[in-house]
Image (cartoon, rainbow, N blue to C red):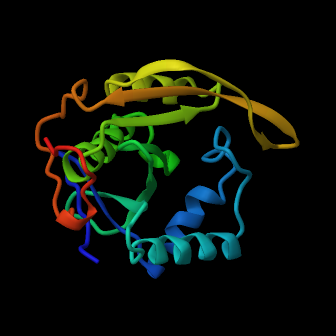
Amino acid sequence: MTPLRPTGPNLVLREVEPEDTGDLLAIYGDPEATRHLSFEPRTREQVDAIIARSIDSAHATPRTEYCLAVTRRGEHRLIGFSRLATEPQQAATIGFALHPAAWGNGLGTETVHLLCALGFDGLGLHRIWAARAPLNAASARTLLRAGMTEDGRIRDHVFVHGAWRGSITYSILEHEWEPIGGLVTDGAAESDRGPGPAR
């Protein structure tokens, strides 16, 4: 496994470690942080399983899932959790969650840019897409600021909090993405690259 560290002006994405459990629980176990996510607050045991699965996925060949800790540049502590899962036809879906203390200062937009850098520059993808809860207006602003385009709605996409909920989807193509200054995609192995051209 070649460790991944996509780096931006303020953030770094790094591989998940067992020691991240407590910091991830502070996000995934928080009702406010998970209010618009596709699941209800997680227990410590569930977060332990997520961490273990994330570490296992980093050693898969071929690797199809990139679960990465979001950290502030120059610091190691996890302040968010991000995921890119590849799909056929040089595509991937992305998602992320940040600790509420990190909300409101553009770090979500930078996280999306880092995931796009990984997908487009690191893996040679053609299309990246994401989904948000219809009531999550902050996520809509984040995805649009990162250059994504709203595609439409998936009806009754997830069952959460005892009810079915739809999702609003967004996507961006490789030629549409304009990286912000200071982005570096580091550590993406050549063996991880898709069949298409890397930018």
Q: Quadrant of the C terminus?
A: top left
Q: Residue at x 68, y 41 (%)?
A: 35
* Residue nearest the observer in this picture, 185 or 34: 185
Q: Residue at x 70, y 62 (%)?
A: 42
Q: Position of residue 43 (x, y in %)?
A: 72, 68
Q: Residue at x 45, y 76 (%)?
A: 55
Residue 106 appears left or right of 134: left
* Residue nearest the observer in this picture, 96 or 25: 96
How many numbered discs, if any?
Answer: 0
The quadrant holding residue 183 is top left
Q: Residue furthest right?
A: 162
Q: Quadrant of the N terminus?
A: bottom left
Q: Position of residue 158 (x, y in %)?
A: 74, 40
Q: Position of residue 130 (x, y in %)?
A: 49, 36
Residue 116 appears left or right of 30: left
Q: Residue at x 24, y 57 (%)?
A: 193
The quadrant holding residue 2 is bottom left
Q: Position of residue 86 (x, y in %)?
A: 43, 51
Residue 101 appears left or right of 126: right
Instruction: Give the answer, above or below, for where 37 lies relative to 179.
Output: below
